[in-house]
Image: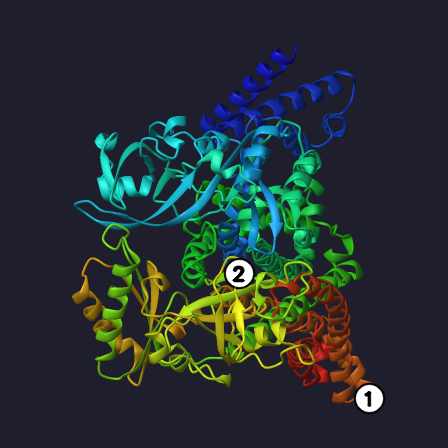
Amino acid sequence: MRVNRFTNFLGELSSRLRFFLRGNAKTDHDCLDEELRFHLEQSIEVNIAAGMAPEAARRQALIEFGGVERAREETYRQRPGWLLETLLQDVRYAVRGFRRSPAFAVTIIATLALAIGATTAVFSVVDPILFRALPYAYGDRLVSVGLVAPIVPEEFMLGGSYYVWRDNQKPFEAFTSETGASECDLTERNPARLSCASVEASFLPTLGIAPILGRNFLPEEDQPHGPKAALISYGLWQSHYGGDAGVLNRLIDIDGTPTRIVGVLPKSFEMPALEAADVVLPQALDEAAERKEQPDSVMYSFARLKPGMTQEQAQAALEPLFQYSLSLAPAEFRKEVHLRVRSLRDRQMQSVRLTAWVLLGAVLAVLLIACGNVAGLMLARGTARERELAVRSALGASRGRLVRQMLVEAMLLSTAGAAFGLALAELLLHAFIAIAPAGMPFLDKARLDLRIVLFTLLLALLCGVSLGVLTALRKPKAISLVARATNSGAHAWMRQSLVVAQIAISMVLLASSTLLVRSFWNLHSQNLGMQTRSVLTATVTLGRQRYDTDQKQMQFFTQAEAALRRLPGVNTVAISDSIPPAGSHRESILNRMGIEGIPREMLGTGGMVAWRWVTPEYFRALDIPIVEGQGFTEVERNSTDRLLILSKLLRDRLFPDGGAGENPIGKRIRPGVEEPWYTVVGVAANVKNSGLTGSDEPEYYRLRRNVAEDWGQSSVLILDTSLSPEALAPWVRTEIGRIDPTVPVEIETLNKKVGRLADGPRFETALLGFFAFTGLAMAVIGLYGLTAYMASRRTQEIGVRMALGADRSDILRLIAWEGVRLIVLGGVLGLAAALGVAQALKNLLFSVGPYDPVSFGAVALLLGLVALAATLIPARAAMRVDPMEALRCE
């Protein structure tokens, strides 16, 4: 039965389309008229045969027939192509109306294009972060599993615990691990510095990924002394090997070790923690050694949930294994260790998810303001067209036909706005990518693909239907045929509500952007504890094959240091293994540090302590004051003494006032349980060392002596110069190239390094500020338009009032009060909403509270002044109306 109905429906639809496409309108009308005349004449003849006079017979036939025009209309509606034909009539009628009012059409299309274009561009950026599926076969069931403790920022596992968990867990179908990614060298005919990730053999199957060429690792390849194998990324395969399928089974040298390429990863492949990986290697850990009680290997574990298993259930099922791992930790640290199971998307997007939601919410708010503006314009136009609609209704147009006309007009405008919006979105997307921070996930995947185009069309459909229904709510009245257009109370209330909503939303956007602006200013102007203006940095990582001993590494860096000292304009050259304020430093546990002769009570870890290897000129190059004792000297650098300088924050933690041994100078400290003793020679001022927004960690500096054991593969050469750091950069590259031209060097001013740390807050502030002021402009335009419209509708009333003795100031107050009332109501509602939104923004703020009175006061003042100006301009125009002209106004 259903099949027959569907077949009949398709047949009728096909018939209607053929009739519409092939029919001759003129012939159809002639045939219809002839048939109507035939039926009318037959009825007349019957009446005459019944004894009526010819005139009476015709009159009676017409009465029985119900009217020729009505019959023609009813018959015409039964034609297969009637709906499509009348729809085209509505489109042509709407286009003619827009041509008569081009300013109206252009204004609405431009407003919608700006709002839809901005929304589409932002959606294309946040879609991969918030909505798009992960590029894994089981993306919705993949989780990150591990321990959370102060020593590692993300959940992690230690070797012994990992294997116990892997062998005894029950909530997962698969359980795997990786040990992270690090730099490696491709040492062949075309050498390159790459990023190599180390993973377990079960890594790809757990994620649901298969190589597009070749195979996965074999179990024997994931053993300490197994065959050396590698999977290469799609990008490396294309750029380095030209997409040659013959790359399989080719031997390449990675850090001087012959390694066989066994497969090529898919183009969409990404590591679960989003680290870069040009080459994926087996981690080849010694499982027997890792199962000891205190393993050293930090691992990151990922798992695939069994079907129907939730994250909460998995975490509960892992509790016994967690308690086992907790028992292996020192008793004083156990309170700071927790179990975490979270989705892979949460781990990947944790740092940008809030930013993405804020930007999407802001641009949707702008879209709402734009739709409110457009709705106000269309309501005003609908009021002006009351007589036209009443005439069409009197001539027989049904209520449905008029509603359809309104919908067609709204859909045409929104579709045109979406078309121009897509073009604008492409431009805005390039602008957003240009100013976006480099670490924003999936930024390279942001593009206007089919999914984004469909989203844009959906926006256009929603806008069109909403606007069409809104303007069609008012039913034409017969009074409109003889009287001027009236200002319906319902429509006036609706227009006022739209303006109130626009002002409230603008208040939320302005308050949010102002908080971010103040936060960014605090971030940018904070004291870093060091100077960055005249400092140039050169980061060098030596290849493991050519520089395979500490002695060779020390010789390279000391030779580079001597060469750079000879450059003109160089005041100071220092070497460190890292440089603040970025958080890429070494760390140790505070309560593992020992002070000779002073027993310390250990309650928990005490937090983490940052530390660096530095040469004596480090503090002078960065202008970090030594507040107690003295700095390192070149003489000490050539000695065998192990020396430390503490930061003031660490000095206060280790030697608090009133405690034993208040003066740290000369004290001997052991940085870790198995570390040698170091002598404290000084205390340095505090320096930002956890990025621009993180809380500063206590810190100490070890003297990097001219002893091979103090050196490593990577170091930062720090130059303080009296010249422009940018001008010095080519000379630095040349000098290092003379020592070894194969060594890659990353040269950058410290100012630029610090500025890059503020890219994220700068991006958030710039976009939210742009949306806030766009929304404010639209809201002010809407308020101005409403006030001007209300003033024009009351022109005759103004004339009567002035004729009865009202002066111009009374008229000003009368019109301005309408706008002020809306400003106050919208401002109060917006303030309440802004306070709620500000609480959600608190994690994005730096040194400013979510309820900062200065920010909210400034926003209220700005919004009030701008909105008041938008109200007073049309009000002042209204008070200048000539009473006689106003009385003669229709």
* Residue 805 - label: 1
Q: Is residue 253 visible?
A: yes
Query: Is 527 in front, or is 592?
Result: 592
Disc 2 residue type (three-letter): Gly
Q: How many marks?
A: 2
Up-down: is 279 above or below 432?
A: above
Percent of width and height locating residue 19: 50, 24
Picture residue at 25% right of the left edge, 55% below the top: 547
- SS at badge 2: loop
- Which of marks 2 and 1 precedes in the sequence? 2
Picture residue at 31% right of the left edge, 43% below the top: 235
Q: Quadrant of residue 502?
A: bottom right
Q: Quadrant of the N terminus?
A: top right
Percent of width and height locating residue 718: 34, 73
* Residue 289 - label: none
Quick check: 189 left or right of 536? Answer: left
Q: Which residue is mark 2?
A: 672
Quick check: 314 left or right of 193? Answer: right
Badge 1: few (under 14), some or many (20 or more) residues near its Cα, within 10 Å? few
Question: How far apart are labels 1 and 2 at the CA level?
Answer: 92 Å
Q: Quadrant of the C terminus?
A: bottom right
Instruction: Choose mark 1 or mark 2, whichever is in front.
Output: 2
Disc 1 residue type (three-letter): Gly
Q: Quadrant of residue 293?
A: top right
Badge 2: few (under 14), some or many (20 or more) residues near its Cα, within 10 Å? some
- SS at badge 1: loop
